[in-house]
Image (cartoon, rainbow, N blue to C red):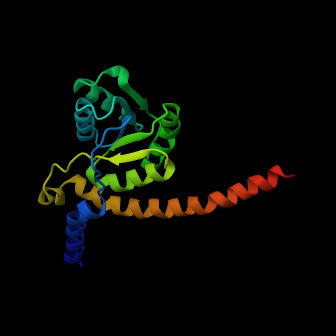
Amino acid sequence: MVAGILVLYGLALISAGSLLMARDVLANADIIVVLGGDGPPRAARAAALWHQRRAPLVLVTGRGDCNFIRQLLIEAGVKPEVITTECQSASTWENATFSQPILIGMQVRSAILVTSWFHSGRAVKRFRSLMPDIRWISVPAEREKSYWRLVFDIDGVQIVKEYIKTIAYDVRGQISAAAAPKALLLANTDAGR
């Protein structure tokens, strides 16, 4: 039984690149959106993109480390005046939800989404589903550790958890999509009274 679990764990790690990661062709955009979490690699990736002039603005989203990531960006040479922060969201779902009014207010048409490589698939799927009028370009921070090292690292556990979170988000998204027409129907019915 233990051997089977270890084999599944290893397969989950090795398959993460093809099953969990979303990487798009790099293109210029209106803004770079950096998700909180694994701050240093995400900040480094976002700063490099900004220096390459891929986007003139940066939005950092995520409670807990948004100001830390902002500071890392500034230390990497990103001008403070181009950085906006959203420091209330506590999940990927909320990152998208709380970023939406900010991005709409900025009239964003295209955005580069920066997060960890194994988190990128779920993240970009959520942002695209909530804001389909924005062209989302997933440019994740690259994997820095070998798969062998991940086996014994906390990131290995995070990767396995990402499979579970991806399934949960898919279910939640389907429930939300199914509930939306019912809510609209109820609102229209109430308006007619």
Identify whether 108 is placed above or below 188.
above
Work out which quarter of the rendered image holds the N terminus and state it: bottom left
Identify whether 150 is placed above or below 63.
below
Residue 72, located in which quarter of the rendered image?
top left
Residue 58 at x, y percent in the picture: 36, 31
* Residue nearest the observer in this picture, 10 or 185: 185
Residue 23 at x, y percent in the picture: 28, 53
Give the side of residue 32 with respect to residue 17, left or right.
right
Give the side of residue 66 with respect to residue 3, left or right.
right
Residue 124 at x, y percent in the picture: 39, 51
Question: Which residue sits at x=63%, y=60%?
Answer: 179
Question: Which residue sits at x=27%, y=40%?
Answer: 42
Give the side of residue 41 with respect to residue 137, left or right.
left
* Residue nearest the observer in this picture, 17 or 91: 17
Question: Which residue sits at x=37%, y=33%?
Answer: 66
Question: Which residue sits at x=33%, y=59%?
Answer: 161
* Residue nearest the observer in this picture, 151 or 89: 89
Identify whether 13 is placed above or below 23.
below
